[in-house]
Image (spheres, coloured by chain):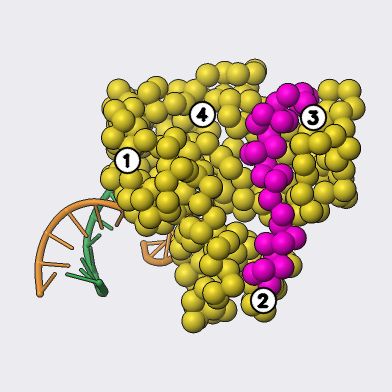
Chain colours: A yellow, B orange, C green
Amino acid sequence: MVITKEKQQYTQSGENLVLHSIKNFDPEEIFDCGQAFRFSETNGVWQGVAFGKVVTCKREGDTVIFYHMTEKDFIEIWYDYFTLDMDYDRVIQIISQDETLKCAAAFAKGIRILRQDPWETLCSFIISQNNNIPRIKGIIARLCETFGDEIEPGFFSFPSPDRLADLTVEDLQPLRAGFRAKYILDAAKKITAGQVEIYRLKHLPYEEAKQELLKIKGVGQKVADCALLFGCEKLEAFPEDVWIKRVMAMLLPAGLPECAREYAGIAQQYLFHYARNHNIK
DNA sequence: AGCCAGGGTCTGC
DNA sequence: GCAGACCATGGC
């Protein structure tokens, strides 16, 4: 099922915008599956910052409420961000030709791959290397508080590449990013200088886009694939981190099934979530 | 204390 | 092409 931009499938009530009868949308699974690092939950309400704006949402059964959201922003920003044009029932049906993927998908039907900002995604996954999710979130929070703009009291935008390009590793010391600081700066410099045109990558074929990202120090196969999948709309990207290597060795030793080729990244996300919640060693 | 975390670079074979 | 040391930091 797909939400279209036609009225009826969403309504406005007061300052809120409400999606009706939507399956495959669970904020907890979307924001807690390791693709976005700027959201947190309080009493079932998820809140964070994306594209320079605060987003607040909550699921109640098959209804999703976005708080303080105008119809204009919904149409122009959040419809794309939450990929409401994607038919997840159909994707799940396709990859469920394989029994293992069917099981993994059934375990977290509410996951969606967000369309995040390419720079924010790249920078976040540079920070992610040899790191754990709570600490990744901490470093990114300090990055935004230190170098971003305060868009609302207590909420900060993600700093642009230009903002960081002329800084030094000493300037980044308050982030406690360790050896990753120099990689963040190299990415900011190459993008600011036009050596890597990050906002053009989603229009390039997967392999060409990947080669561009690999020009950046500290960006290898896995970080590039995460940036492509979560920030450049490349659903065929299949990032292999330690969790995926473990779950593949145990459940799919012959490799990713052919039926999942087109949506490898979505299958990967179901597997990642499954592995982390089943103590796969 | 030692191991691990959504890895990558560098060196040596 | 592949193995191993090393890289900062913090939680367990």
Mark whose residue sits in front, 3 or 2: 2
Question: Helix, strand or loop at disc 1?
Answer: helix
Mark 2, residue position? A97
Query: What's the CA distance linking mark 4 and mark 3?
Result: 21 Å
> Counting residues from the N terminus, which is met first, the one under dot 4 or under dot 2?
2
Residue at 55%, 75% in the rendered image: A257
Which dot marks residue A183? Answer: 1
| Mark 3 chain | A
Residue A186 percent coordinates (x, y): 29, 36
| Mark 1 chain | A
Tell if the residue under mark 3 belongs to the same chain as the one under mark 2: yes
State yes or no: discs 4 and 2 in contact (Cβ < 8 Å).
no
Mark 4, residue position? A158
Question: Helix, strand or loop at disc 3?
Answer: loop
Query: What's the CA distance linking mark 1 and mark 2?
Result: 40 Å
> Counting residues from the N terminus, which is met first, the one under dot 1 or under dot 2?
2
Span colored in magenta:
A68-97
Which dot marks residue A67? Answer: 3
Mark whose residue sits in front, 4 or 2: 2
Neighbour class for label 1 at 10 Å: few (<14), some, many (≥20)?
Answer: some
Q: Amino acid at mark 2?
A: Gln
Viewer-proximal residue among A265 and A152: A265
Judged left or right of residue A269, residue A86 is right
Q: Amino acid at mark 4?
A: Phe
Residue at 51%, 52% in the rendered image: A234
Residue A134 percent coordinates (x, y): 55, 47
Q: Amino acid at mark 3?
A: Tyr
Tell if the residue under mark 1 belongs to the same chain as the one under mark 4: yes
Q: Is residue A48 visible?
A: yes
Is the stretch drawn in magenta largely helix, strand or loop? helix
